[in-house]
Amino acid sequence: MDLNVKTFDEVSQASEALADSDGLFFGGGTILMRVVNEGNPNLSLLVRTTDPRMRAINVANDKVILGGGTTMLDIINHQELEFLHAPARAVGGPAIHAMATVGGNLYARHPFGDFTTALLALSATVRFAGDDEDREISLEEMLKDRESLPRRIVTSVAISRPAHDIFRFTKISRVRPHRLPVMTLAACLPINEGKITSARIAYGAMASTPVRVTAVEQALEGRALDPAGIRDAVAVATEGLSPPTDAIATEWYRREVAPVHLRHLLLGNSI
Amino acid sequence: MKKKPVHLRVNGVEKSVFVDEGANLLDVLRRSIGDVSVKYGCGQGTCGACEVMIDGVLHLSCLCLAEAADGSNIETVNSLNNGELHPLQQAFMDNFGAQCGFCTPGMLMAAKALLDKTPSPTMEQVIEAISGNICRCTGYEPIIHAILDAADRMTSQQKA
């Protein structure tokens, strides 16, 4: 089957072209171009857009809105987004940084999705092309239904800028600095009068998509961020999870190391 | 298969070619334009052998849709040699930074991308810069030392 590539000036046109077609949206290419290069006969239509709004980054007060086509390099080069530099750098090497997009990372399959793991801990919301302007869904909801919903164009992802030092991120790989993750961890740890309140913890590579770890979040509520305060949270580090086995690590290995890395993350230890 | 016209500036020379829809930039550079200095390693964006600069930014040409690069300025490793070896190439030779040589074009472009922005990098920055490049025979240490050596040579040249 011949492959067609359609390019549109505006994202709304691209969205319309995708509707009622078997086509796929082509963003940075780091996911789809692999499929194209393999010569997948089922792939008949790629839709792309050159709409500059897709790469817009808006930072206003504490609100950050990243266009779906924003690349990891765009984020690394943005001085006001320093808290996102580590998650963006975790996505491959320098050439990948220039190509991989925020929207694409939301659809990256296991074990990829390091940036999405960070967004999940930051309570991100997602907007899609074709929706009403005021409609957005939580990233958590989107990830739960990711495989069953029709693929649509992510126009933007919104997060609140975390207060100083409450956001933490780490990627655990067997080969440094950038290879496939054994696991990725991100945490948002607001502290009020010395106690953790409403923590958000997310893991990457520990399920089919990045996931929140609610058992850990609950065990941290009202506790101090010190070795004694996090003990219960570390004990339930993998509760409710069924980590995959792959070429990087077995389920058993991921379960064994998760508490160790969670403890390091929470205590701010470098590994 | 449908063809689309694509205009590129490759190593300073204007090139106009017709490309298949869905063709990647790597294939177009090698097959249509004849620049075989760009290597086909994995076709999956994993090995870095196909790295080129597009408008001054390092990219994996195997994952670039050729038509998306229309109007761009492309630099391959052939752009480094202007009659004499580039300091990076010389440093790779002097430091045994290439054995089979297959990863070398990508390594050199990754190194150039680093030194263009960071003329005096630390070893950590060099490691980060080539973290998307796989070498299976030389080993990374000679390559890292070659890049650091090239940085020294280039900064010395500029001072002189």
Image (cartoon, rainbow, N blue to C red):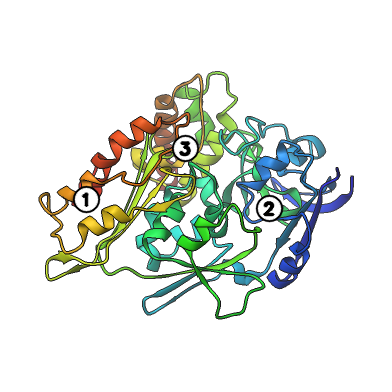
Q: Quadrant of residue A218?
A: bottom left
* Label 2 – label 1 distance at C-alpha: 52 Å
Check whether the beta carbons of the residues at disc 3 and disc 2 lie within 8 A of each other.
Answer: no
Percent across and percent down for residue B144 are: 41, 31
The kind of residue tagged 2 is: Asn
Residue at coordinates 25% horizontally, 49% vertically from top-left? A265
Chain ID for label 1? A
Could you classify mark 2 by the number of other residues whose Cα lies within 10 Å: few (under 14), some (14-19), or many (20 or more)?
some
Left or right of residue A223: residue A57: right
Determine the residue positioned at 15% across, 48% down. A231
- Tag 2 and tag 1 share a subunit: no
Location of mark 2 (residue):
B73
Reading the image, the residue beneath label 3 is B130
Give the chain letter at badge 3. Answer: B
The crowd level at tag 3 (other Cα within 10 Å; few <14, some 14-19, many 20+) is many
Gap between marks 3 and 2 measured at Cα: 22 Å
The amino acid sitting under disc 3 is Ile
Q: Secondary structure at mark 2?
A: strand
Identify residue type, mark 1.
Ala
Name the residue at the left extreme: A228
- In this figure, which residue is indicated by the disc labeled 1? A233
SS category of the residue bearing label 3: loop
Judged by depth in the image, the label closer to the viewer, 1 or 3, is 1
Between A197 and B88, the one lying in front of the other is A197
Q: Does dot 1 land on a helix, a strand or a loop?
A: helix
Marks 3 and 2 share the same chain: yes
The circle drawn on residue A184 is: none
- State if disc 1 and disc 2 touch (CB < 8 Å): no
The quarter holding residue B76 reads: top right
Question: Which sits earlier in the primary sequence, circle 3 or circle 2?
Answer: 2
- Report the Cα–Cα distance between label 1 and label 3: 37 Å
